[in-house]
Image (spheres, rainbow, N blue to C red):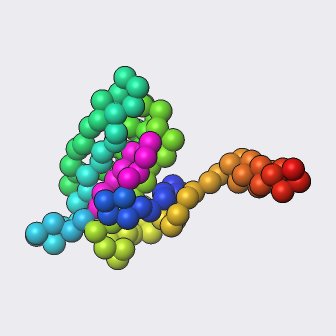
Amino acid sequence: MSAYRKIGVGEDAGDAVTVGIEENADGRVVAAVWWPSRGDVDADEADYDTVDEALKAAEAAKALHGFPEVVVTLQRDELWQPRWGTLNDGVALDDAESFELARAMEASRDA
């Protein structure tokens, strides 16, 4: 199951593909995917009728363009469905990144 970092509405996602999820005027949950320009990759944005389609497109864009992560921003927290994956607040680190961060902190304490 995929895990995503949640960012606030309007928050800068940095070097990431963003999936924005909202409820439209008809009460349907829809999504948009966008990313910043990066090297020879132009910034882009696309709208999707379902969150499933948007997440699939975001993961494909991440892989194709070499972005480090997919982040999610929600109009309201209640819109997130567990079947889409895990939504984490704050910075999401993998095991290697967590180890490196802890190692660097310990090294700076010993200095």
The answer to whether 71 is drawn above or below residue 22 in the figure is: above
Residue 85: horizontal and vertical position, in percent? 47, 61
Which residue is at 20% across, 55% downward? 49
Which residue is at 41% across, 51% downward? 13
Q: Is residue 22 visible?
A: yes
Q: Quadrant of residue 50?
A: bottom left
In the image, residue 33 lies in the stretch drawn in magenta: no
Q: Nearer the viewer, residue 85 or 14?
A: 14
Which residue is at 44% across, 62% downward? 6
Residue that extends furthest to the top in the rendered view of this protein: 40
Which residue is at 32% across, 63% downward? 9
Residue that extends furthest to the front in the rendered view of this protein: 111
Read off the magenta span: 12-21
In the displayed structure, does residue 32 sit left or right of residue 64? left
Q: How many marks?
A: 0
In the image, residue 19 lies in the stretch drawn in magenta: yes
Q: Nearer the viewer, residue 88 or 28?
A: 88
In the displayed structure, does residue 4 sit left or right of residue 74? right
Q: Quadrant of residue 23?
A: bottom left
Q: Nearer the viewer, residue 110 or 62?
A: 110
Residue 37: horizontal and vertical position, in percent? 34, 33
Q: Is residue 86 visible?
A: no
Residue 110: horizontal and vertical position, in percent? 89, 53
The answer to whether 76 is drawn above or below residue 49 in the figure is: below
